């Protein structure tokens, strides 16, 4: 008969899990139990607080829909997604463009548009051009790379936040790089925005006295056979929240300005030039932190 106290219960839980056949699952679950128990001891967690935590996680799950992933949002505001990205970048075989969060608004199946097209159905401000090259880490072009982009409008909302989200695809598109790795498209400068604050994660962020904003940015998911998929974003330097992103996605190497540019493929519009570098792939290495929310809902069914 075991006689357990607040310390020996940790050993007992680890002992029961000791025969887990999958070594990686065992490593992860052992560490999770050790750290969770240490956390509960450190804060002297009470039963009422434990229940509050359970209620919070229940609400996070209940807020998830095919168009909203509240658990990803939770990982983001706690800095976990940025941490996983940073470790993932470090593990690459060679240096590529830095990763940034996929976020909860990625969606598969955006329309593929010809180079130079606009991703905005009804722009109400002058458009800008985003252009550059997709290369390997030596600067050699990666022809035909798939460049998926998505962003908020000039008013700060994603299409997925519209009431009729299921029917609308806007402010997102897929492009193919040309034979020299060149890509370009038109868009509007996105407005920085608040993360969704109407759910349990937003309520937590408010209780922590945080502003909840992300600086203006454009998301990119760039892939090509044989290369590590790159999930990243470009951030506009003059946004007031550039140094206090609620989800810790900004890195100096991803900060840009839209400016007059005589080399732009579309003269007369302000432009951002950015060259993306992809690292070669390792087996089983997708590079994604996050997923299309509808895919996650399907996988959980
Ligand atoms: C986004 O960039 O779309 C995003 C990322 C994390 C949380 C909320 C939004
Ligand atoms: Fe975003």
Image (cartoon, rainbow, N blue to C red):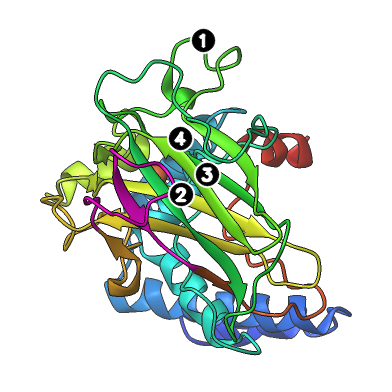
Task: Assess whether residue 96 is covered by the magenta stretch.
Answer: no
**Could you say which disc has been placed on residue 126 in the image?**
none
In this view, the mark in front (4 or 1): 1
Figure check: 270 above or below 196:
below
Near-viewer residue (252 or 100): 252
Residue 17 visible in the shown view: no
Near-viewer residue (179 or 151): 179
Q: Earlier in the sequence, mark 4 or mark 1?
A: 4
Image point (45%, 11%), residue name: 163
Q: Position of residue 217 (x, y in %)?
A: 33, 48
- In three-dimensional space, the C-alpha distance between marks 3 and 1, rounded to whole angstroms, equals 21 Å
Q: Position of residue 57 (x, y in %)?
A: 47, 45
| Range covered by the magenta-colored residues | 257-275
Quarter of the render that holds ligand 2: top left
- Magenta stretch mostly in which secondary structure? loop
Q: Circle 1 is placed at which residue position? A: 164
- In three-dimensional space, the C-alpha distance between marks 4 and 2, rounded to whole angstroms, equals 28 Å
For label 1, the SS is: loop
Q: Earlier in the sequence, mark 4 or mark 3?
A: 4
Q: Circle 2 is placed at which residue position? A: 219
Residue 75 found in image quarter: bottom left
> Do the numbered discs 4 and 2 sit on residues whose CB atoms are within 8 Å?
no
Near-viewer residue (10 or 107): 107
> Do the numbered discs 3 and 2 sit on residues whose CB atoms are within 8 Å?
yes
Image point (38%, 51%), residue name: 264
Q: Circle 3 is placed at which residue position? A: 149
For label 2, the SS is: strand
Figure check: 195 above or below 160:
below
């Amino acid at each position: 008969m075991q006689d357990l106290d607040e310390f020996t219960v940790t050993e007992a839980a680890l002992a029961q899990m000791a025969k887990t056949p999958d070594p990686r699952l065992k490593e992860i679950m052992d560490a999770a139990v050790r750290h969770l128990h240490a956390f509960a001891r450190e804060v002297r967690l009470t039963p009422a607080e434990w229940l509050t935590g359970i209620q919070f996680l229940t609400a996070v799950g209940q807020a998830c829909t095919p168009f909203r992933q509240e658990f990803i949002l939770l990982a983001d505001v706690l800095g976990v997604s940025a941490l996983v990205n940073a470790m993932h970048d470090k593990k690459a075989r060679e240096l590529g463009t830095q990763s940034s969060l996929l976020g909860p608004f990625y969606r598969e199946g955006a329309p593929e548009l010809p180079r130079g097209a606009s991703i905005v159905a009804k722009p109400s401000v002058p458009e800008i051009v985003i252009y550059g090259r997709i290369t390997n880490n030596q600067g050699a072009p990666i022809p035909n790379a798939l460049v998926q982009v998505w962003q908020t409008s000039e008013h700060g909302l994603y299409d997925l936040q519209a009431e009729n989200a299921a029917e609308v695809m806007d402010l997102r598109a897929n492009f193919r790089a040309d034979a020299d790795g060149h890509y370009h498209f038109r868009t509007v400068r996105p407005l920085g925005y608040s993360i969704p604050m109407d759910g349990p994660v937003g309520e937590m962020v408010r209780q922590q006295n945080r502003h909840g904003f992300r600086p203006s940015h454009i998301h990119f998911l760039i892939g090509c056979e044989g290369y590590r998929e790159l999930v990243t974003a470009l951030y506009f330097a003059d946004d007031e929240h550039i140094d206090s992103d609620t989800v810790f996605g900004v890195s100096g190497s991803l900060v840009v300005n839209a400016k007059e540019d005589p080399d732009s493929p579309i003269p007369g519009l302000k432009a951002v030039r950015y060259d993306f570098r992809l690292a070669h792939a390792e087996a089983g290495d997708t590079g994604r932190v996050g997923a299309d929310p509808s895919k996650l809902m399907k996988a959980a069914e």
